[in-house]
Amino acid sequence: MAFQSLFLYFLSSLAAVRAITVYNQQPLGQTQTSSADGAAYTGYQAYNPATLNAPGLPDPLPATQFGIQLQSSAAAVTGLSIPVSGALFGFSIETSVINQFLGVNSSFIQVPFLNLVSNIVQRAGRFHIRVGGNTQETARLVDQTADGRMIEKQSIDPNNPTATPVLIYTMEMFYLLANISSLMNVKWYLGIPLNDTSDLHLEVAQYGEQFLGDNLLGLQVGNEPDLYARHQHRPENYGPADYVGEVGDVIKAMQANGNIPNTNNIIGPSVSTATWTPEMVFDAGFITQYQNNLAAISVENYPTDNCFAIYGGNGSPHNPQDEFINFLTHDGLYSGKHMIEKFLGASAVAQQSQKQMLMFETNTASCGGFPGSSNSFGSALWGVDYGLQLAYSNFSHALLHCGGQDVFYNPATPPPTGLSAFHEWTIGPLMYSILVVSEALGSTNNSRVIDLFTNDGNVFTPGYAIYENDQLARVLLINYMTDASGANDYTATISVGGGDTGTPNAVPAQVKVKYLSAPTVAEHFNITWAGQTFGGQFESDGRLKGNETIETINCDQGQNTCAIKVPAPGVALVFFSDQALQESEPSSTATFATTAVTRTLNTATIDAQVLATSNGHSGKDRALGSTSKGSTGAAPASHVIPSLTALFSLLAGVLVLFRAFTR
């Protein structure tokens, strides 16, 4: 698009911005009920109030007093992971709902989303988002949609068992992603449509590279190709060799396209393991043929599914109460440890091939998760354990899937558009998992993790040690039990060096501890991280509320011990030095103001000067490059998009929509 035409487009868009108050209507009413057990609930499932019972205490009970012996130096520890980043967890956002999560278009970005992501960027240095999923396969770029929206769902094929709509989108999508990255250090994964290899649509590769530059981490080719035949997208005999051949077709088409200069950022095979294993795809030549084109090896996995409740068919129904306990032990049926066991071989192959291993899409259960568990504090404990287990198993990143209003597992859910004039976002328990894991791993990109198998390997009391720059930095301890009496809170007595380690005593004089806590594993909203919370349903603008509480525990250096108490239920993150705390704890978090412009609701202003330095560097100095510690790379300034956001910041400040407009 010529700059002159682009400029005229922006001027016409500016005129539309002046009329935003037409959208500020109050909805006529809500269709939701809130019965105590959720039985009469008829509203969106994302707000389903159904609450489960916390599982009973195990029999026999685990010990509530036990020791942990650690080495102070990573050089003395066998079995540590590869170096991993605090940006381990990111979002996988279904393409069809990005206008709800990210923004209506490039100039109306969701302020709560920006605030949420800023929490992680300030802790981990960056944040990764995948835009894709089933809907990426049929997404098509168009000049404009009939009603001017950035993205539109078309008709759904009644023969499609996943009920996936055909999508059309405009260039606004690329402008939106680029503008978000200009505000903070967000990196992106995009997906190339693969539903029709005879008519490849490579616009997402062309414009993704053009507008995102170094902020585009990779392009997924094929979303769960092992399910293509089952979902009637390929013949019944479609197999790994067929997929490998189609990846080759995509690479050849990219290489023949003069507008796609980079063809070494392919991500795959992204199998779900329902019918293929990653090794089956490797054996078909995936890595050997495309070694120079692959940016990373990817898989997608959920520990179970709730598909029967939605689609019926030949699946099996699940009782959420019966399934709850399977998420609540270190080695349970749905635990991170159990999930990852089948990928350890593929992870080893990725390391041998010098490729990152990615869990490209995951969450508590496919088809939206389970009511009462996927949106409970238990899922937060599960997420923390899962994240550290991924790191321990040499996964570099994992993306928690975000759907629309009718799923239970969203880390964050925008309000329904009909409620957007007076309700705010709802933050799920998994968002706390992302926070905790980012702080556990820190911002150096050099943390190495080991599963400690604490308390003689008891599955209700797992723990991990994190070594940063080759020194013990943090210990994370989990208590899966629920006991309001306090009788099953446990105390782990940590020793560093000394004893029979052959090294001197190294326990510090004191340690700092942050707690993730809730009254019960079944709790939905009364959750705090170091005393702070995102609040309840329809209460969040993406910022943590309350005063942060970091406890100081005095250690006994004479005995070389630190006694750390872990509540039932809860997580304790122990920092062994001020530097370890500083590498995890932001000195300040950039937030995005929500003061009104046209009314007391719906709109937000950000001063242009504040916006330009929202992540520590001006847009001019940073372009679209990294602000991670120690990073020197930056994308060329030519990648900065001359979008409405940039124009506002130059002319009149930036106007960002606080909530999605009624549309």
Image: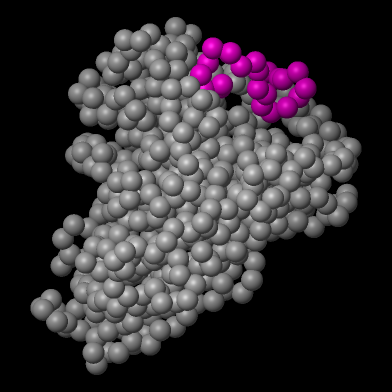
User: Residue 63 versus residue 432: which sits nearer the camera?
Assistant: 63
Task: Report the coloring of the rendering.
Answer: one colour
In x, y percent, where is residue 329?
Answer: 35, 56
Q: Residue at x 32, y 34 (%)?
A: 297
User: Residue 418 versus residue 222: which sits nearer the camera?
Assistant: 418
Q: In screen coordinates, is 34 left or right of 637?
A: right
User: Residue 264 versus residue 364: which sits nearer the camera?
Assistant: 364
Q: In screen coordinates, is 78 left or right of 400?
A: left
Q: Is residue 73 a member of the stretch shown in magenta?
A: no
- For the C terminus, which image quadrant? top right
Q: Residue 330: in sight, yes or no?
A: yes
Most common SS among magenta residues: loop
Q: Quadrant of residue 466?
A: bottom left
In x, y percent, where is residue 93?
Answer: 54, 37
Q: Residue 102: in sight, yes or no?
A: no
Q: Quadrant of residue 177?
A: top right
Q: Quadrant of residue 648?
A: top right
Q: Residue at x 51, y 56 (%)?
A: 53
In x, y percent, where is residue 632?
Answer: 42, 52
Q: Residue at x 29, y 25 (%)?
A: 276
Up the image or down, 158 lies above or below 319; here it is above
Q: Is residue 155 a member of the stretch shown in magenta?
A: yes
Up the image or down, 272 lies above or below 343; here it is above
First to last magenta residue range: 142-164
